[in-house]
Image (cartoon, helix red, strand yellow):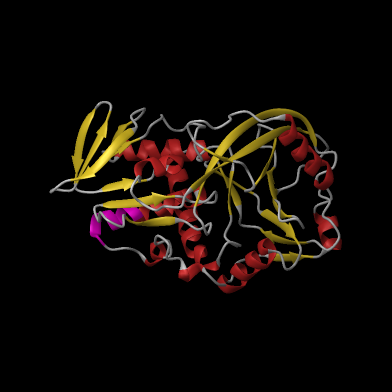
Amino acid sequence: MLGFDRHAPPHALGSSHGRSRIIRQAYFEHPDYVPLVQRALLLWNELQHAAGRPLLAPGGALMLGSPDSSLIAGAADSARRHGLEHEWLEQPELARRFPQLCPEPGMVGLWEPTAAALVPEACVGAQLEMARAAGAELHLNEPILEWSPTAQGISVTTAQGVYRAEQLVLAAGSHLPDLLPDVDHGLWIERQVQYWFEPLGHSAPPIHLWELADGTFLYGFPDYGDGLKLALHHGGEVTNPDAVRRSHDAQELARLRGLAERFLPGLTGRLLATEVCLYTNTSDGHFWIDRHPDHAAVLIASACSGHGFKFASALGESIAAWIATGRQSPELSLFAHRSTTGLATR
């Protein structure tokens, strides 16, 4: 097994960083994701045990929005269909349980006690350690320049040489379009800024995810040692990974501070840090995991549309099995290129 990365992960140049990532089972995006995220959670716990250091922070997560919002209605639907532990919270109970938060009139909450935060940099580091221990050869700071089919499989060219293999998995994130020059992929790259603030007040909220009346998605984490993290989910500017702005501007910060004061009044102090994350989006917001339309020896495993990190353990397992056996798991069949009919309706 030979792996290439244009950088040396863990790093903060793609979409697998940010010090904390939500893993939640009441999946509002679609209930068909639930078995996959349940498998992912099991594998993350196994990796944590094998690595001998913390990779997850338990504590539950609170979703807030109107009862008919995609967030609340979708999460409730997934929870009911799969028998997931959850609580529906009206405003009086929200105020009693989570006085740090200030939901608007008409908002309700859905509490998922089994949700947790992954530490992405630690997760990636542990996965790389296990890969090396299993015999994988990792070529870091060695981007793929091009690939081409051969009679025996695939040829891959980098600045350091030419490599040949029977099969190739492209999991290049925001650089995937560069490696698919002849495919009508429809991918677009979105810049998102993550913010950490000095925590104020006597108690911090749990992991929280909001869908506001105007369609804005806001999310945040308690202080795990770096400050209170807040960010928007989608709605960022379209960008190019080689020319992305890596710093925030005053207008972006002012908008987030305004939302913080509106929904988490008095909890955020001075700005401590920011990081930029890149979403590689498909047209429908679902994943793209499928064989190349013209070259069966190439498997495309990318474009997770800003909500894929939590699945990395399970996706890696399923993709490896697909490569080894030639058989696609039912979970991955959901993500065929331009064929997400199984995810189209609830």
In this figure, what is the number of numbered marks?
0
Nearer to us in this view, 13 or 183: 183
| Spot occupied by residue 264 in the image (x, y as percentages of width and height) | 81, 44
Q: Is residue 325 magenta?
A: yes
Side of 265 relative to 332 (left or right)? right
Location of residue 335 with respect to 149 vertically, above or below = below
Above or below for 288 versus 259 = below
Give the left or right position of residue 205, taking residue 20 as reference: right
Q: Taking 185 as reference, is 189 above or below it?
A: above
Q: Residue 224 falls in which quadrant of the image?
A: top right
Q: Is residue 307 rendered magenta in the image?
A: no
Identify the residue at horizontal 33%, vertical 29% (top origin): 142
Overall secondary structure of the magenta section: helix
- Residue 53 visible in image: no
236 or 5, nearer to the observer: 236
**Image: magenta residue range:** 319-326
Q: On the rendered image, what quadrant is the N terminus found in? A: top left
Q: Residue at x 33, y 48 (%)?
A: 182
Can you tell which quarter of the image residue 126 is in?
top left
Q: In the figure, is residue 174 to the left or right of 140?
A: right
Q: From this viewpoint, which residue is outermost toward the left? A: 151
Q: Position of residue 195 (x, y in %)?
A: 67, 35
Residue 164 seen in the current view = yes
x and y, in percent, of residue 330 in the image: 38, 67
Q: Which quadrant does the C terminus fall into?
A: bottom right
Image coordinates for residue 257, horizontal then vertical, percent = 78, 37
